[in-house]
Image (cartoon, rainbow, N blue to C red):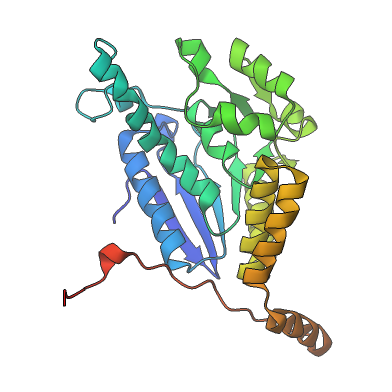
Amino acid sequence: MNYECLTLTITNKIAHLTLNRPATLNTMHPALWRELTHALTTLNREANARVLIISSTGKHFTAGMALDVFGADTGISLNDSTAAGRANIVPQLTDMQQAFNLIEQLRMPVIAAIQGGCIGGGVDMISACDIRLATADAFFCIQEINIGMTADLGTLQRLPKLIPEGIVHEMAYTGRRLPAQRAFAVGLVNEIFDTQDTMLEAALQMAREIAEKPPVAIWGSKQAIHYARDHSTHDALQQMGWLQSGIWQTGNLVEAFTAKQQGRAPQYDDLAPLHSFSEGKYELK
């Protein structure tokens, strides 16, 4: 697929997805939803990378949803004039939410590198990432309340699990900007950088460290963290036992110790590609 709203590269097992419409402040055009879904689905299926960095171009990470997302020509028109039209809003929102769900469900860690404004849908996006880095001029805004609506693509569901609920209430009710320094103080971002270049280099260095680890153990860690976030400690410990019994590889431990003794980087197998029933050729017998 030829992308117009983003670029996707893979180098040394590190995937880098970049929003590339700086002239429009990287607003989330309908084409972006299709391209993002395709890119994430492909990465998840092919497993040819071990970590993903999401960054952007220009002054702002993203100014949020483009107004033409809700145009009649996009198929995303929300009709509130009839009960039947309102009933269609649910599956329509579910379809849009799925693009960001794919970030959270990706079989690899996702690092967001954020500069300037991260507004509206941008907050939905970065809330689904595993790690967030930011420049000193970055800010976060639940813009939806400023245009007369409730945020509906994941911000209000994921953000309270990342930062204190009171801060989420403040942002959601007032539409105020959360500047980078305060975002760091409340735990939304891991680290702040003076420039975008230094932030991207830090993201790449972190990605390189992750890519050196065994992918199956990284995947297991991500599964365990997300499960523990949404369940009791007792249930999460039980799930950990089931998870570990499925992914345990003594060979990875042997390789880690051997590589250290030999003074070399350890070598681990990638995750296997995924195959869908829809891709196969079958004969009825």
* Residue at (51, 11) in percent of width and height: 146
Image location (x, y in percent) of residue 121: 48, 30
Nearest the eye: 191 or 285: 285
**Which residue is outermost to the front?**
285
Image location (x, y in percent) of residue 10: 48, 64
Q: Is residue 239 left or right of residue 80?
A: right
Q: Would you place residue 241 above or below residue 127 in this image?
A: below
Nearest the eye: 159 or 115: 159
* Residue at (75, 80) in percent of width and height: 253
**Which residue is outermost to the right?**
261
The answer to which quarter of the image holds residue 280 is bottom left
Image location (x, y in percent) of residue 129: 59, 45
Image location (x, y in percent) of residue 240: 71, 59
The answer to which quarter of the image holds residue 178 is top right
* Quadrant including the C terminus: bottom left
The answer to which quarter of the image holds residue 32 is top left
* Quadrant including the N terminus: bottom left
Task: Determine if residue 174 is in view.
Answer: yes
Q: Is residue 185 left or right of residue 59?
A: right
Nearest the eye: 230 or 203: 230
Task: Determine if residue 265 is in view.
Answer: no
Q: Would you place residue 266 above or below residue 58 in this image?
A: below
Q: Would you place residue 255 above or below residue 64 in this image?
A: below
Q: Say how many tags the image has.
A: 0
